[in-house]
Amino acid sequence: MRTIRRLIYGEVLSGVGFVTLCFLCLFFFFDFVEEIQSIGRHGAEQYQLVHALSYVTLMIPSHLYELLPIAVLIGTIFVMARFAKSSEYTILRTSGLGPWRALKTLLILGLGYVFLTFAIGDYLAPMADRSAQLLKARYQGRITVGHTGAWLKERQAYSQFAVNIAALDSDDSMRGVRIFEFDNQGYLMSMLQAESAVHAPDDSWTLKRVLRTEFPAREVDTAHIERAQMESFRWPNQISAEMVSAALLKPERMSTIDLFQYIRHLDANGQSAQRYQIEFWKKVFYPLSCLVMVVLALPFAYLHFRTGGITGYVFAGVMAGISFFLLNNVFGYIGNMQNWQPWLTAAFPGIIYSLLSLTAFGWLVFRR
């Protein structure tokens, strides 16, 4: 069995590695062609060829995270179908590789890809994607969301704050910051307008060039507004740099821990966290799709097409894998609109395809 496992693992690893490399080269080419259009068009510090190459290279981990499960599917299907066509799998079966032992062998290999996908998606891809976005912001402008920027909420003991951030610079500083302070009854107490802000190490923001406007209390009969100009102002809060990035960047690019902390922040401030909860559970279940892919590929080893080509079967397997990812994305949008349970929304496509794969495997083994 050790020799059989070494043969299967070596072939599958080679097949998956080749498919992954082809996909990454293809996406690298597409990204580079798209970035060429922006070269030399932005400001005094022009966006040059070396910057475009750096940006496209930094996007590779994100593409690898997205493509690894489907590369596992295509590579494993190709190997299993080739074994079946050349009768190698028949020889392996007569050598003691039973159906459940074959399933266990592939699941162990798939578990390795699960850990690899999790490590890339939770550590390497968020860091590389953030660096890529900040690199692009340095030469093409600031990171922003629409015309109104990003909105966050902070609740403290005796007041609550609504925070608006227009843009994020390449050095993680915030531009166009507005902070609205409300009392516990929802009445506006003050407003801070700052040209820029940076995160301080003591859970606070340091605001620069600040205009503070204070509004009268409700009990005061004489209406008056007080304004004050300050060069700097310290505002204590619990809004971290990761939370600001979450509001300005795509949630699927965040790590699992950052998503969990941001969800807790939204819940503590009475904000809807449905979208981020779905993304959190998708980050949890997405690496497990590698297990679904190897289970989906195993039935191809039990097909009989000695005289025919394997292209059609590989194509059918690829279409099945693509349909899995389409269903995964569709369920995410539908679950967000219909307010479904986030964990069920993220797990349901994997459950469906796992059952279909095991059914096909059982039918081919016991029926044929």
Image (spheres, rainbow, N blue to C red):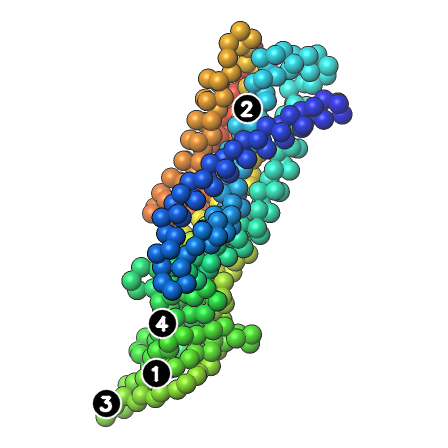
Identify the residue under disc 2.
77
Residue 211: image tag: 1
What amino acid type is highlighted by mark number 4? Gly
Residue 46 spot, x, y in % from top left = 40, 59
What amino acid type is highlighted by mark number 3? Ala
Viewer-proximal residue, 39 or 173? 39
Q: Left of 181 or right of it: where is 111?
A: right
Local packing at callout 4 (Cα closer than 10 Å; few below 14, some 14-19, many 20+) is: some
Q: Furthest residue to the top?
A: 307
Nearer the camera: disc 3 or disc 2: 2
SS for tag 1?
strand
Q: Specify which label sits upstream in the sequence, 4 or 2.
A: 2
Identify the residue under disc 3.
223
Is residue 9 at all visible to an observer of this figure?
A: yes
Mark 4–mark 2 CB contact (< 8 Å): no
| x 59%, y 28%: residue | 15
Identify the residue under disc 4.
176
Q: CA distance from mark 2 to mark 1?
A: 63 Å
Q: CA distance from mark 3 to mark 1?
A: 20 Å
SS for tag 4?
strand
What amino acid type is highlighted by mark number 2? Ile
